Image (cartoon, grey):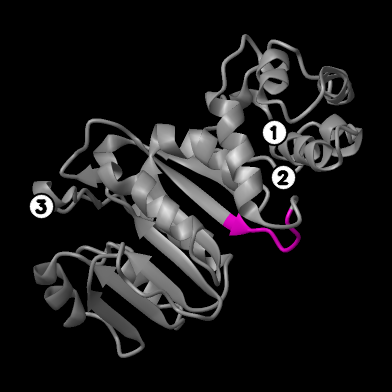
Amino acid sequence: MPYPTHGGRHELGQNFLVDPAVIDLFTDLVGRTSGPVVEIGPGDGALTLPLSRTGRPLTAVELDPRHARRLARRVPGHVRVVAADVMRFRFPDRPFTVVGNLPFHLTTSVLRRLLDTGHWQSAVLLVQWEVARRRAGVGGASMLTAAWWPWFDFEVHARVPARAFRPMPSVDGGLLSMTRRSTPLVVGAREPYQEFVRHVFTGPGRGLREILERTGRLPGASVRDWLVAGRISPLALPKDVTAGQWASLWRAVEGGGRADGGEARAGRPGAGRWRSRR
């Protein structure tokens, strides 16, 4: 099947998805979720139209008013097209699913907005490949992932080649899902935990043992106990710590230094995953 020749506006970072196989995989992943759908950046409707066939209520949020007007004329009645900036859009106050082919240059900003937004339960997003890998903790997690891991599970499903887009970007994309945990790995306020993660990622030291000791939040003996319980090298880096290990580390901090080896020993409970279906 030949690819369509239309493309997005360069100044808006628009790279439209045109590969039918990727669109099928995307819609299959969305089909595993439930509830109303909010789509970010629908463009010409490559995902909107297939998703509309499920009959689920769908709101498509499109920044470009030209595309919004054009798409509104093509969708059935249960689909609402809104010409708006997703960074200012008011999301529903009830459970919903987020989907979207995100502009690569805005990926981190949009992800931060979503992670700080309540009510949505699942998200299926097409983002830059390296961003998808880092968010899922493949090859090492980013500070953003570690900060939100106790509340969200991240999984990368497929690598999407640049040729699947028009116009063609300079890098590949990746299909990433984010799911809100029914039971968070960390109980209590997010801010203290997230500030601790920031201190660990930005703190000085050669490896986790030195970094953690220099935070002043744990005595040296407790740091060593936590590393031993989790079978973690003293020279490992913050990016190497899994979701369950971050949770056990935070419990040790809150518990005055008592190491919790249960989840740390388990290796990767709640960590991101990488599944290839290509």
Asked whether the beta carbons under mark 2 and mark 1 sit within 8 Å of each other, the answer is yes
The quarter of the picture where residue 60 lies is bottom left
Q: What element carries label 3?
A: loop
With 222 as the anchor, is 32 left or right in this view?
A: left
Q: Write the residue at 35% across / 77% down.
A: 59
Q: Give percent across and percent down for residue 70.
A: 13, 75
The residues colored magenta run: 179-184
Q: What residue type is labelled 3?
A: Arg
Residue 242 is tagged as: 1
Q: Look at mark 2 in the image and give the residue it sits on.
A: 270
| Camera sees residue 70 | yes
Please identify, in this view, whether the residue under mark 3 or under mark 2 is nearer the observer.
2
Q: Look at mark 3 in the image and give the residue it sits on.
A: 9
Asked whether the beta carbons under mark 3 and mark 2 sit within 8 Å of each other, the answer is no
Residue 277 is tagged as: none
With 218 as the anchor, is 235 left or right in this view?
A: left
Separation of residues labelled 3 and 2 (CA atoms): 38 Å
Q: Give percent across and percent down for residue 264.
A: 83, 33
Frontmost residue, 218 versus 239: 218
**Among numbered discs 3 and 2, the one appearing first in the sequence:** 3
Q: What residue type is labelled 1?
A: Thr
